[in-house]
Amino acid sequence: MRLKKSLTISAIAVASILGLGACAGGGDANPPVAEKPSFEAGTTMAKLADAGAITIGTKFDQPLFGLKGPSGDPEGFDVEIGKIIASKLGIAADKINWVETVSKNREPFIENGTVDIVVATYTINDSRKEVISFAGPYYNAGQDILVLAGNPEGIKGPEDLKGKDVCSVSGSTSEKNIAAYGVNLITTDTYSNCLEPLRQGKVIAVTTDNVILAGLADQNAGEFEVLSNPFTEEPYGIGLGHDDDAFRDWINDVLEASYADGSWKAAWEATAGKVLKTPEPPAVNRYSN
């Protein structure tokens, strides 16, 4: 593991966290697959449906949302959202090609065609919308802070981190947000790589979205705790090719249908809902470029 030191910003908001109890398992919902769906020729939907397969980028180290399981495939809420989208294209779960996608390569993977979509705790923001498009949001998270159990330093919020060593992931929204608080940022490629520096006292805290931190705390019971004091709002969206309006509109339709038919709720309760309470799904944002 290589850690890089730099100056950064912090962010987080929303989403209530309950007790970090049972370990969140895969929760394989496997929604029913549409039979021979029809799409306008030339659209991304038609191409994927005709191919009978889709490549989805997601994280492999995020408990609750995208964590590599015993089968070798990732498990979690993001994964189940990907399955819902694939099913409406007539693509079964076993025809999904999952590609590990970390924060810093999400836009490049979409731009160069490595993946068809990215579902990876991916915050929608204006700078990213300059190079890719977003459907959603399908979940609203918020940035928070992870500390050692018992909070020995008495940290209450990001203001208490000024001048202190804090770990986050390079290329993430969290990295950008925390810099505003004058922290000494230690960056790595995955949030799980921040845990050992926290254990060893090389950093005083880890910061990213509260749901990610909740998963890490749950996976390492008794070692860490989340402050549960989010300081930003992080709407999670589905990344896709820039200006592919037809595909974006279609995915938004799929998300809204999943809210209505209960498949979104079932996906949540089978995964992240084992640790976090079930929220209301957010309204999708059908923005114009």
Image (cartoon, helix red, strand yellow):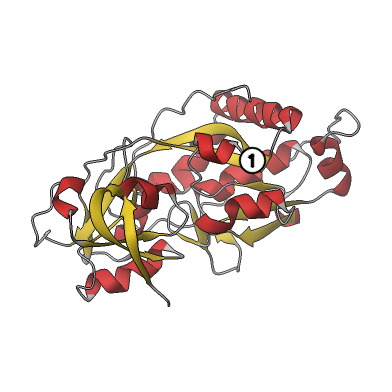
Q: Residue at x 60, y 37 (%)?
A: 130
Q: How many marks?
A: 1
Quarter occupied by residue 8:
bottom left
Q: Residues within 10 Å of mark 1 (few under 14, many from 20)?
A: some
Q: Position of residue 218 (x, y in %)?
A: 31, 59
Q: Along the horizontal axis of the image, is 109 left or right of 138?
A: right
The residue tagged with tag 1: helix, strand or loop?
strand
Q: Residue furthest right?
A: 41
Q: Position of residue 136 (x, y in %)?
A: 56, 31
Q: Along the horizontal axis of the image, is 183 left or right of 11?
A: left
Q: Residue at x 55, y 41 (%)?
A: 128
**Which amino acid does the dot numbered 1 rest on?**
Ile
Q: Position of residue 181 (x, y in %)?
A: 23, 48
Q: Which residue is mark 1?
A: 132
- The answer to whether residue 30 of the structure is visible from this angle is no
**163 or 125: nearer the viewer:** 163
**48 or 203: nearer the viewer:** 203
Q: Position of residue 146 (x, y in %)?
A: 25, 56
Q: Along the horizontal axis of the image, is 83 left or right of 21?
A: right
Q: Residue at x 50, y 23 (%)?
A: 283
- The answer to whether residue 112 of the structure is visible from this angle is yes
Q: Residue at x 67, y 32 (%)?
A: 251
Quarter occupied by residue 273:
top left
Decide: is 246 above or below 269.
above
